[in-house]
Every structure is written in structure tokens, then in C-alpha cells.
Image (spheres, rainbow, N blue to C red):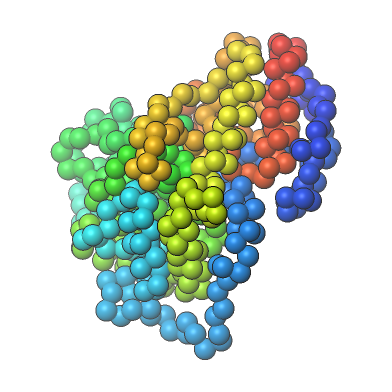
Amino acid sequence: MCTEQAGRVINFSLSSAACNSEANGSRTNLSSSDSVINLDHGDPIIFEPYWRKMGDKCTVVIPGYQSLSYFANINNLCWFLEPELEKAIKRLHRVVGNAVVEDYHIVVGTGSSQLIQAALYALCPPDGPEPVSVVSAVPYYSSYQDVTEFLRSGLYKWEGDARTFDKEGAYIELVTSPNNPDGTIRERIVKQGEGKVVHDLAYYWPHYTPITSPADYDIMLFTISKCTGHAGSRIGWALVKDEPVAKKMTKFIELNTIGVSKESQLRAAKILGVISDNCLHFGSSSSDNFFEYAEHLMAKRWEELMDVVGRSAIFSLPEYPQEYCLFAGKFTEAHPAFAWMKCNNDKIEDCEKFFRGNKILTRGGKRFVADPKYVRVSMLGKEDEFNLFLERLLAIQETGYVLG
């Protein structure tokens, strides 16, 4: 139940669309108004219908004798990177145009979280006089601080907001673009002295944001989780310009996990290859272009959310400018993976707490070192969850919510 501080519980009516969990392949029964909707995590199940439609096109058969060795290519700097995945990554970036791959080394990791740690390790001198400062501009991805502090490394130290950072000496800035949680395009903030920058480009794909130019930074991180929705495969990759840095990142992963699962790499290579193949038919009536499908789906969800939010002044959402997308060949606007929603009612001091009282789990602004009036809402969940969220949000607004 909702406490007095969090607000009163709203009675919800459910549409058939919100309850149609069996038809779209979801596994959770949301037919009850007592159901809790979890929009905290960015679990990208939204794309499941597309991959069901692909049938066996992405099926990979691995015989028992294959992939026995630790090594994938002993002549490669990243010796555990499967050649098929390396080719698929380079091809996809060239097709989409979101990153330069020529003269870059590819380092594969178990998701981009491992690659963040590998990059921090690689960018820090082993004999520095003090730990290297690690910063990111608020609001920043809520796990950056946790990942940086988890190993309690003597090589680096979390120093918080890049906008207020003014220490002398070496530092590493983590730049997420489009940003998690608010979907904005970011550039580095700190430009003094001995700084290094890691660009986390997990969401720089055409279904989330216009591709305005190919990224060309020293270290760029990507993940299949947000690109295709295959979060469970745990595959990420780094495009690294400097060879010594790439070698140190590879060494970190070698010591951490002795490489990356070959089965996951081969599956990822197949999936990325299918996406690249289907991009050849962009815009045709028979197109199975994943990015075209995903962009339409994200645009539809954002349109529906903005329609509901726009019916009152209780909540608000960011506005994103239209920009020319080189991949789509037209002007588009961002449809981020998360909605950075603000509670404008003066009597709602903690938006996460308010939503929790109405059985909607979100990630509060405090987790991003931002105002607690903000919450991050995942746009990547199941269709029935999203529909039920819209219904509850509309019901909250129609009551003209006031604190009890």
C-alpha cells in the first residue's frame, strides 16, 4: 500500500492490451492491479518479437569438438576475440556509420561493465604517486561509482561530478553519449592537464538517437545488450586507438576471466551479421531492417508516453532536437532507452518513492546524484508492462494528485 508520505493508491482499470501477456510471449501475469511494474532496470526485452520473427536465421550450431581452446587467434592483440565477431563488429559499424573502425584495435569483454574496469586499469600508471581521479558529469550512470569503487583499487579513485572537479594531476572522465539517464548527447567536460577520456557509446545506435557522425575517440565502448537486446549473451567490445592501452585492457580481461565465452561471441557474430544483411534492404516494403523496426517501436512508445504526460502538468519529460541521421537519411529525433521524468508537483519531494507507492519501480534521481524529483523509467520492457505503466500514470494524473 501507499503510505501518506508517498501518496495515496490509485484504483486502476486494465485494458486488454495491458493484459495480453501470453500473446506477446511475456512470462509475467500483469492482469492484477496489485502487480508491481519494474521499470528500474534497462532489460531490453522490447525487441523479442523481432527476434522471434527472425526464426532460425540467428541459430548457431556448435559441435562438441569446437571452441575447446582458450585461444581464438594467437596472432591478434586480443587473442581471445573470435575472428567472426571481429569481422561482424567492423562491418556493422561501417553499415551504420556510428563509429570509425579503421586503425582501431577491438577488445572484447563480458559486457561493457568489464570493459570499463579494463579501461580504468589500462589508463592508470602502475607506479603513480596517488590514485588517478575518475569523474563523470551529473547526472551520470548510476553504476559508474560502484564499478570504480568495487575493487578498492589503489590505481584510481572515484571523485564524482566532472563539472565540479578541479584537482591537479591525472584524471579519467567517463562520458556516456547518449547519456544514461537523460538521453542527451555528451562531450567531455574536463579539459585540463593530464586527462584521459573513456566514451561509453552503448546507446549510440539509430533506434535511440540520430547518427550525426561516426564517433572517433581514443576509447569507445559498445555492448550487444543495448544494440540488439541480447543482454544475456554478455558481450561488449571496445574500439581502442592506442595499442599499449588495448594490450593492457586485454591483459586485465585475461587475468579477470581468462578471455570471453566463445559460444557467446559466435552467437553475437551471427546476430550482428544478420542485422548487417538486413540493413541492405532499408526502407523497402519487405525490409527486416532491425534498426528501422526498433526505431519505429521506440518512437511509438515515446509518442504514447508523451501523450499521457502532456495531459497534465504533474510530470514532464525532456525535449530532444531533430537532427539529420546519416543512417536513416532523414531528420529524426532521439527516442532514448530511458525516460528522465520529473515530478513537478511541489508536494511530491521524492518521485521514486511516490511511484513505488503506486507499485511502479523506477530509479530515483538520487542514484544519479540528481534531484530526487527525477526518476529514470525504462522504455525497454515488455509491451504489457509498458501499457500498464501508461494506464497507471494516466490514472494518477486524472485524480489531480495532491498529497494526503
Residue at image coords 79%, 22%: 10
Image quadrant in which the N terminus is located? top right
Is 369 drawn above or below residue 157 in the view shown? above
Residue 245 shows up from this direction:
no
Quarter of the image for residue 197 reads: top left
Image quadrant in which the C terminus is located? top right
Residue at image coords 63%, 58%: 53
Residue at image coords 61%, 47%: 46
**Image coords of residue 318 (percent x, y):** 48, 24
**Image coords of residue 246 (percent x, y):** 26, 62
**Image coords of residue 103 (percent x, y):** 21, 61
Residue 363 in the figure: left or right of residue 390: left
Is 1 drawn above or below residue 94 in the view shown? above
Q: Residue furthest front?
A: 285
The number of callouts visible is 0
> Is 355 or 151 nearer to us in this picture?
355
**Image coords of residue 171 (percent x, y):** 25, 42
